[in-house]
């Protein structure tokens, strides 16, 4: 059913001002009520308003009748005396389950929870209205915080068995072989440091987004690296060319020359790690190198990934490099800095301190 109501321009301004005030105060029921009236005034049917705002038909008719009779005086909710209603423990558990499932699963056409959406969810499902300030406290007390999400591969289900085998079979085997041979256990990877810099979070005045100069030059400083599980040793080799099997062999050859122990090399499946040239290289140095591939799509299994983050944080985050030489100097300085902190590098091995491998070490 379509209801025709018209307002004078000054009444429209008043209604919109009421809406802005309701938003500012976090009065969700009032926000919905005013939106329902605006939709009706714009020609929507009651059925459309009911579906859009998740309201009952009787509520919408009630809003319309009250506005016709009492105009803007109807846009007031009397707060009940006494303590405001709270969610019970069972309701909190149910709310946590819904938050974990995500807003799309709860019928919202978006992928991100914000306070307003959760406020609406609580009101619709439990009939309890929270002020946004107190809702934030509720979520904090429930163990939630406002975080940036991260990507995970959509192939993880395919490699679940590989990951489980790594934790329960491969890693304990690596530790056992390393102890038998007195070998170094080396996690390997590479990283690019871009001349145009990198962005990060920092403190700044409200309303003034920090800015960082950038040369815009698409040139990068490339670094191969290895970190050792037992000692925290850090081997690295930087260059300005591309990551290739040839440059990777050159790096590993330098590490072989600097060490006398057997090397257990753990690496991902990058093309220049697994090429035919690398297969020949590993076969030629089988007396010194044993290679283990990490599970696919599992960068979190490689602790050197966290070292690269730390190096970038100190060397390129929010920094300006007008010349490529400036970038090289800064990255080299920070690489040398971490090479002198083996204890800090050992702290990156936390994932493996909870596995059978560490029990074998003890």
Image (cartoon, rainbow, N blue to C red):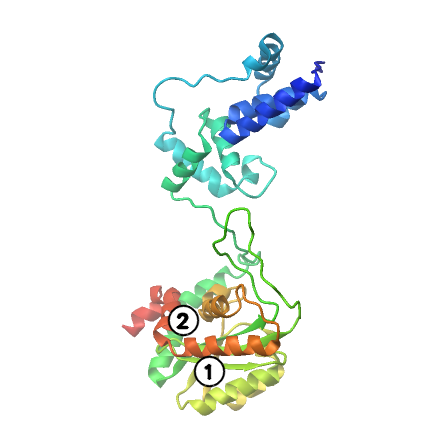
Residue at image location 48% in from the left, 66% down from the top = 313
Residue at image location 56% in from the left, 86% down from the top = 249
Is the C terminus in the top left, top right, bottom left or bottom right quadrant? bottom left
Q: Look at the numbered disc 1 and give the secondary structure of its residue.
A: strand
Q: Is residue 353 or residue 31 the one in the foreground?
A: 31
The residue wearing badge 1 is 290
What is the number of the mark on residue 171?
2
**Dot 1 crowding, Cα within 10 Å, few <14, some 14–19, many 20+:** some
Q: On screen, 205 above or below 75?
A: below
Is the N terminus in the top left, top right, bottom left or bottom right quadrant? top right
Give the left or right position of residue 85, taking residue 68 as reference. left
Residue 6 visible at all: yes
Give the left or right position of residue 349, taking residue 114 as reference. left
Residue at image location 59% in from the left, 71% down from the top = 321
Work out how far the residue at label 2 is from the one at label 1, CA to CA, in angstroms: 13 Å
Q: How many marks?
A: 2
Q: On screen, 183 above or below 354?
A: below
Percent x, y of residue 234: 43, 79
Give the left or right position of residue 234, taking residue 38 as reference. left
Percent x, y of residue 44: 70, 21
């Amino acid at each position: 059913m379509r209801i025709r109501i018209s307002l004078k321009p000054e009444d429209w301004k008043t209604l919109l001002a009421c809406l802005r005030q309701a938003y500012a105060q976090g009065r969700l029921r009032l926000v919905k009520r005013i939106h329902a009236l605006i939709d009706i005034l714009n020609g929507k049917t009651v059925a459309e308003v009911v579906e859009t705002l998740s309201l009952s038909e009787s509520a919408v008719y009630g809003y319309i009748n009250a506005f016709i009779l009492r105009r803007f005086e109807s846009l007031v909710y009397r707060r009940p005396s006494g303590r405001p209603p709270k969610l019970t423990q069972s309701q909190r558990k149910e709310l946590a389950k819904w938050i974990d499932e995500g807003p799309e699963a709860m019928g919202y056409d978006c992928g991100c929870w914000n306070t307003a959406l959760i406020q609406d969810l609580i009101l619709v499902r439990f009939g309890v209205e929270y002020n946004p300030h107190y809702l934030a406290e509720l979520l904090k007390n429930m163990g939630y915080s406002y975080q940036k999400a991260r990507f995970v591969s959509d192939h993880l289900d395919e490699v679940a068995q590989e990951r489980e085998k790594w934790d329960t079979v491969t890693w304990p085997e690596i530790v056992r072989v390393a102890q038998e041979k007195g070998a170094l256990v080396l996690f390997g990877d590479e990283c690019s440091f871009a001349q145009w810099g990198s962005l990060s979070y920092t403190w700044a005045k409200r309303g003034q987004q920090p800015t960082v100069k950038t040369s815009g030059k698409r040139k990068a400083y490339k670094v191969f690296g290895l970190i050792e599980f037992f000692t925290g040793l850090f081997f690295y080799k930087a260059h300005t060319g591309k990551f290739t099997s040839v440059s990777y062999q050159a790096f590993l050859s330098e590490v072989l020359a600097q060490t006398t122990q057997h090397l257990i090399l753990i690496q991902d499946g990058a093309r220049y790690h697994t090429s035919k040239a690398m297969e020949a290289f590993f076969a030629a140095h089988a007396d010194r190198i044993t290679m283990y591939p990490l599970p696919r799509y599992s960068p979190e299994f490689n602790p050197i990934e966290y070292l690269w983050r730390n190096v970038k944080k100190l060397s390129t985050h929010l920094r300006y490099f007008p010349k490529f030489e400036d970038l090289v100097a800064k990255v080299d300085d920070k690489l040398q800095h971490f090479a002198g902190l083996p204890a800090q590098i050992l702290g990156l091995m936390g994932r493996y301190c909870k596995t059978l491998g560490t029990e074998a070490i003890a």
